[in-house]
Image (cartoon, rainbow, N blue to C red):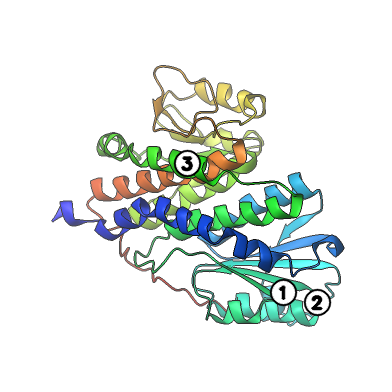
């Protein structure tokens, strides 16, 4: 029956504040583990992940580049696993993000990077996973068993653990209590998001958009909706969108903006105004941009920095994907054609 759809995914989204609480309780232990790395010797960072974890990596990339000021790139594991390249990674930190820690291509890439001189830090939800064991430093996500195929609480956990990593590196603190409180308030939006989803028309196409730290959530929103609702969704940086893709937009198109508290409105303003001239079907997650009364606001944290608002707002995009799937009579717990653990080579 329809009301039974998404029971597991919903429970895991609702568990996010508790996951954050466990991460807070173990944050000093994480700091001690991070301290074992010689971060002062690191000249560049390479991130490696797949799917949802790859999206979390985008958030971490922005954190490292803005807070630490060193280059941070995204790995192509096939360089090693398909082409057999020998890596030269002196003074490089490789950070692997994975819920399961089992994908052979991630493990193979990290092994090659380690052999090439890199320091390896892994974030996984399984301390006994191959990826955890091959790393110099492993940060446990404390998300607990994640049973729904579409990852939710592990993504949010990756965001918060990324925040801890870079905060320690930079010498900053993390306001865990504020993040947890705003996440709890975000979950109260579930009934309203459900009502919006029940009348949401995606037949003319859906595009998700963000910039800066919110770029990660824009990609993750698109992925979650594609996984659970089984429709194509495009995701873009609001800056990149003006360089061609906007030509596909028309009056029936739906656009979801991810604009967390603290976002620089000037960075998105030109794109928003151009889109408003074309379509009135605009939706918002995040409290960081001035909206028109005719545009639909799904909720967003307040009183947080941009970096922290992205973390708290993650439950809103997850709730939207969940509700869209249920309103479409699809089971987001077990989407056809997907498995919980995907082992790519």
- Mark toward the viewer: 3 or 1: 3
In the shown orientation, is residue 9 left or right of residue 50? Answer: left
Please tell me in which quadrant of the rendered image residue 252 appears. top left
Whether 126 is drawn above or below 66: the answer is below
The residue pinned by badge 3 equals 313
The residue pinned by badge 1 equals 79
Tell which residue pokes out farthest to the top in this image: 293
Q: Position of residue 281 (x, y in %)?
A: 41, 27
Q: CA distance from mark 2 to mark 1?
A: 9 Å
Specify which label sits upstream in the sequence, 2 or 1: 1
Q: Nearer the viewer, residue 308 or 58?
A: 308
Q: Quadrant of the C terminus?
A: bottom right
Q: Nearer the viewer, residue 282 or 180?
A: 180
Whether 47 is drawn above or below 240: the answer is below
Q: Position of residue 100 (x, y in %)?
A: 49, 73
In the shown orientation, is residue 248 left or right of residue 281? Answer: right
- Mark toward the viewer: 2 or 3: 3
Whether 173 is drawn above or below 127: the answer is above
The residue pinned by badge 2 equals 87
Residue positioned 48% across, 34% down in the render: 301
Give me the disc on residue 208. Answer: none
Please tell me in which quadrant of the rendered image residue 91 appears. bottom right
Question: Mark 3: few, some, or many residues within 10 Å (few <14, many ≥20)?
Answer: many
Q: Secondary structure at mark 3?
A: helix
């Amino acid at each position: 029956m329809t009301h039974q759809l998404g029971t597991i995914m919903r429970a895991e989204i609702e568990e996010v504040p508790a996951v954050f609480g466990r991460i807070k309780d173990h944050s000093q232990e994480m700091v001690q583990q991070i301290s074992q790395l010689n971060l002062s010797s690191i000249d560049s960072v390479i991130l490696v992940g797949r799917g949802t974890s790859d999206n979390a990596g985008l958030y971490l990339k922005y954190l490292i580049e803005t807070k630490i000021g060193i280059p941070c790139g995204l790995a192509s594991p096939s360089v090693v696993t398909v082409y057999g390249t020998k890596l030269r990674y002196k003074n490089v930190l490789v950070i692997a993000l994975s819920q399961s820690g089992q994908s052979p291509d991630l493990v193979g890439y990290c092994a090659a990077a380690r052999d090439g001189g890199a320091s390896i830090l892994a974030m996984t939800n399984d301390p006994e996973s191959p990826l955890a064991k091959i790393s110099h430093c492993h940060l446990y996500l404390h998300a607990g068993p994640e049973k729904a195929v579409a990852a939710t609480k592990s993504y949010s956990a990756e965001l918060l653990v990324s925040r801890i990593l870079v905060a320690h590196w930079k010498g900053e603190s993390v306001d865990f209590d504020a993040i947890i409180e705003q996440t709890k308030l975000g979950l109260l939006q579930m009934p309203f998001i459900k009502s919006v989803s029940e009348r949401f028309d995606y037949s003319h196409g859906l595009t998700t958009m963000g910039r800066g730290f919110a770029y990660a959530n824009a990609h993750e929103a698109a992925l979650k909706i594609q996984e659970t609702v089984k429709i194509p969704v495009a995701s873009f940086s609001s800056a990149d969108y003006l360089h061609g893709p906007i030509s596909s937009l028309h009056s029936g198109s739906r656009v979801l903006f991810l604009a967390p508290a603290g976002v620089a409105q000037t960075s998105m303003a030109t794109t928003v105004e151009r889109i408003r001239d074309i379509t009135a079907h605009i939706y918002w997650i995040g409290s960081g941009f001035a909206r028109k009364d005719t545009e639909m606001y799904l909720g967003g944290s307040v009183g947080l920095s941009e970096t922290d608002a992205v973390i708290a707002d993650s439950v809103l995009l997850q709730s939207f994907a969940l509700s869209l799937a249920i309103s479409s009579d699809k089971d987001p717990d077990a989407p056809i054609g997907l498995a919980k653990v995907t082992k790519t080579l």
